[in-house]
Amino acid sequence: MFKLDPDSREILSDSLDLFNGKPPLEAFQKSSLVEYPPMAGTGTGPLQFRINSGNAYIDLSSLELMTKFRITVKNADNKHVPFHTSNIPKDVQKDFQKSDPVSLINGFGSTFIKDIRVSFNDTVMYKSNDLFAYNAYFRQRLGLVHNEELNGYFEDGLEHMSGPGFDARRSLFENDDATFETICPLNFDFFRQKKLLLNQTIMDITITPHNSAFVLLTADKKYEYEYHMVACKLYVRQNTLLPTVDLKIQEKLNKNAIVKYAFNRNIMRNCFIPAGHTDYSTVLFTDCIPNRIFAGLVNAKAFNGSMDMSPFEFSPFNLESIRVFWNDNATPFSPYNLNWSKKKFGRAYRDLLDATGTNHGISVQKYLTNSCFYGFDLQQSHSHQISEIQTFGTTMISLNFKAPVPENGLQLIVFAEFDCFLSMDKTRTFTTTISY
């Protein structure tokens, strides 16, 4: 026998490591999941949570939001009552049961959120620019996170206003009090990294919900529907370290060591394209160049909230070409020449698959109808273990249409991802390399 590489290191099979057990983990004295109710009520206004960690270290990646929803319908007495069959007017009960006229948007456990703002010690470290619903939907639809039915996510067919996903979400509310409880992680950028948040940090989270016109889907204009938050709680895993471990951390901090967190920052942009236009260009960023960009087009009326239109119906809209320019570069290098009637979109579909780095689960038929996204991979390497050298410049996007933009206009939704770095000192003052 001989080694293919004479300089390679020899190792012993784990199955022959007979004299050692599992190495012990010496870190935690106690770990507990703590429930936080909102400081304000669960009405239509913003929800405010305050987490004062004290001596505990918070695991942000395990933070979860529990929300209990109810759908109501206005009855003959002009009052909103829980939405189940016994409350539907008798003259339409039969038709109601056949047509299933109302449901919620996909992934409503997180997509009901319009905006999230997070502060550490009264300094803002994250804000979603009123686009958190699209941030959450992009991540779910493109397979960047695991989709969960407990989050209210059910795969739609070729129609968003009917079909298996619409029916499945509606059926969740077919119970005595017409409610359903969702649980979803608040896994936006910094909260996805695995390092614990330093103790003695006060974290404030403000959640602003969307209105019923955005969250509910129905073509039934005869009756008035609303959704309500019946309850909302935040669950946070807090870890108390062994005194010796905690002491070592504090000693390093007192010697001016800096705590370092590396993560992927997500920044959302939306741009209105007026009706009648056949081309559109705009600057997206003027500082760091993103690692990758995803983009899609939705009807502006649906974006602003209209129950008879899904805000997540990303259609082709006769787009002929879409390109991202940064400094002296362009992606794709050769422009697309999309022709949807002739099903000429293979390059764009393939580039989306390459940019996600995973199987996004979007079929060709769905790509042609309601899940038409474009992916632009600007990275030099694709490793989660390293960060790339930051490139600075201007990033812009350009679109050309075969036919004029339709009535209502379009909203271009952009999801961009950057390598980012957050540092925190002994005073719990933090700085980041990329702001919103």
Image: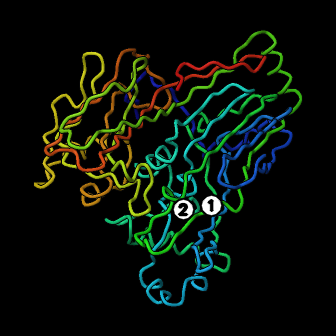
Spatial CA span between label 2 and label 1: 7 Å
Image colouring: rainbow
Quick check: 40 left or right of 262? right
Q: Height in image: 322 above or below 420?
A: below
Location of residue 303 in the rendering, given as x and y in whole percent from the top left corner: 41, 49
Mark 2 neighbour class, 10 Å CA radius: few under 14, some 14 to 19, many 20 or more? many
Circle 1 sits in a helix, a strand or a loop, which is it? strand
Spot the residue most to the left.
342
**Mark 2 vs mark 1: which is more N-terminal?**
2
The residue at the point 37 percent across, 34 percent down is: 293
> Quick one: 365 or 316, which is closer to the camera?
316
Residue 239 got which mark?
A: none
User: Residue 406, position in %: x, y?
Assistant: 23, 49
- Residue 209 percent across, percent down from the top left: 59, 50
Question: Which disc is residue 152 wearing?
Answer: 2
Label placed on residue 182? 1
Question: Residue 99 at what x, y percent from top left?
Answer: 41, 80
Name the quadrant of the N terminus: top left
Q: Mark 1 belongs to which amino acid?
A: Thr
What residue do we see at 43% from left, 49% from top?
Answer: 304
